[in-house]
Amino acid sequence: MLLIFTLYLISAQVGCEEDVKVTGYEGGSVIINYKYNPQKYNNHTKYFCKINERNCKNIFSQTEEKWDLKGKFFAVDEIPAGVYSVLIRNLSQEDGGNYRCGVEDQNEKPLNVELDVENGLYYGKSFSQTTHPGDVVTFSCTYPEGHENDMKSVYKVTSQSIFAIIFTYSDKENKDRYVLHVSSRDNVINMSISNVTVDDGGLYLCGVLKNKPSYVSIFSEMQLQVTAPGSSSAIIITVYVGVALLLIAGFTLIFYKLWSTKAKDASTPADRGNPVNREGAYSAYYEKIQDTQATTVYVSAQKPKTHPISPNLSGRTATSSS
C-alpha cells in the first residue's frame, strides 16, 4: 500500500513546467511536493525561496536535508522517488504569496507556487502526548468544507522523510496496527495506533491530499513520545531522595556543631575563654593542698607537752581533814 501511494504521489505530482495554487489554513500547515528526475538530479542542490517583487528570497538550499523538525520550514529529499517535499508549519497571513522550488540547473524550469492562507480558527491544533509501549494512541483532526472528496491521510515526519502511514477515500481503513475512521457528517478524521512501540514516537500530521494540483493541507499535529513504564517516575523519586538525604545530612551537621559548642562552654563557665586564669587557679589549688599537708605533718611530729607536779605535793600522801 505504501508503494502504491508513493507511485500515486509521483504520478499525480504537477510537473516542473506548471505553476500551482496551494490553499492553506491559518494555524495549519502545507506540504508542497516537487518532482524531479532522480537519475539526472540526484546530486543537485534543491532550493525553496519566496518571490519578492523581482527577487526570490532564499529560505533554504541544500543537498542533504537535515532541518530541525521544530522549525517553521522543513524539507526532505526523497531521491529514490525523485520527490522534494517542503513542509511549512503554523501558517499565518504573512506566509501567503508566491514561492519557487527547484534544482540548481539553468536548463531545468522551477516550480512556481502561489500560497493562499485562509482563516482557520478551528485548525492548526498542536499537542504532545506521552504513552507507554503496548498502549493505544488516538489522533484526530477536523477538516473544513470542500474536502469531502479528497484523500484523508495521516503522515509521519522523520529527519529523512515525510510519508503517509495510512490514507483512505472511504470512511474506514485498516493497516497493520493503524485504523483510520472518517466521519463525513462531522468532518473529523480519527486515527488510532494499537500496541504502541518505542519506534512509533515522532511527529504526526493529520490532513487531506489534494489531487489537482497535488499538495497536502494539514490541520493538526501530534508529537508522540513513547517511554518505558515508570522510567520518568523512578528518576524523579531518585532525585527527591537524594535531595532529602543532603538536607538531613546538612541539618545533622549543624545540630552537632551547636551541641558540641554548648557542651564545651558548659564545662568551664567561670573561666570560659581564659586558659591563663584556669592554670593559675589549678596552681593555687595544689599549693594550698601542699601547705595543708605540711602543717599536718609538722603538728604530728611535735613531742607531747607534760605539766610538772607541784613541789608541795611531792612525796606527800593526801589525807582527809578531820
Image (cartoon, grey):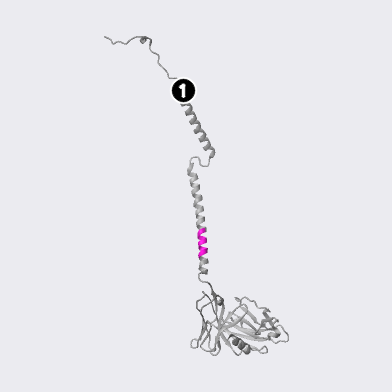
Q: In the depicted view, which residue is nearer to us: 270 or 287?
A: 287
Relative to 99, 264 lies left or right: left
Most distant residue in the right direction: 106
x and y percentages locating residue 169 in the rendered image: 54, 89
x and y percentages locating residue 293 in the rendered image: 47, 28
User: What residue would you read off at disc 1?
Assistant: 301
x and y percentages locating residue 148 in the rendered image: 53, 89
How many other residues sit within 10 Å of disc 1, few (<14), some (14-19) or many (≥20)?
Answer: few
When the figure is inspected, residue 312 is found, relative to residue 301, above or below; the finding is: above
Say which quadrant the C terminus sits in: top left
Q: Can the viewer see residue 31?
A: yes
Quadrant of res 219: bottom right
Say which quadrant the N terminus sits in: bottom right
**What residue appears at the point 60 percent right and 83 percent down from the top-left corner?**
31
**What residue appears at the point 62 percent right and 88 percent down from the top-left corner?**
7
Q: Main secondary structure of the magenta part?
A: helix
Magenta stretch encompasses residue 239: yes
**What residue appears at the point 52 percent right and 38 percent down from the top-left corner?**
278
Most distant residue in the left direction: 322
Q: In the depicted view, which residue is nearer to us: 166 or 287?
A: 166
Question: At label 1, which amino acid type do we have?
Answer: Ala
Quadrant of res 81: bottom right
Helix, strand or loop status at disc 1 = helix
x and y percentages locating residue 123 in the rendered image: 54, 82
Magenta stretch encompasses residue 125: no
**Magenta residue span:** 237-245
Q: In the depicted view, which residue is nearer to us: 246 or 114?
A: 246
Q: Can the viewer see residue 188?
A: no
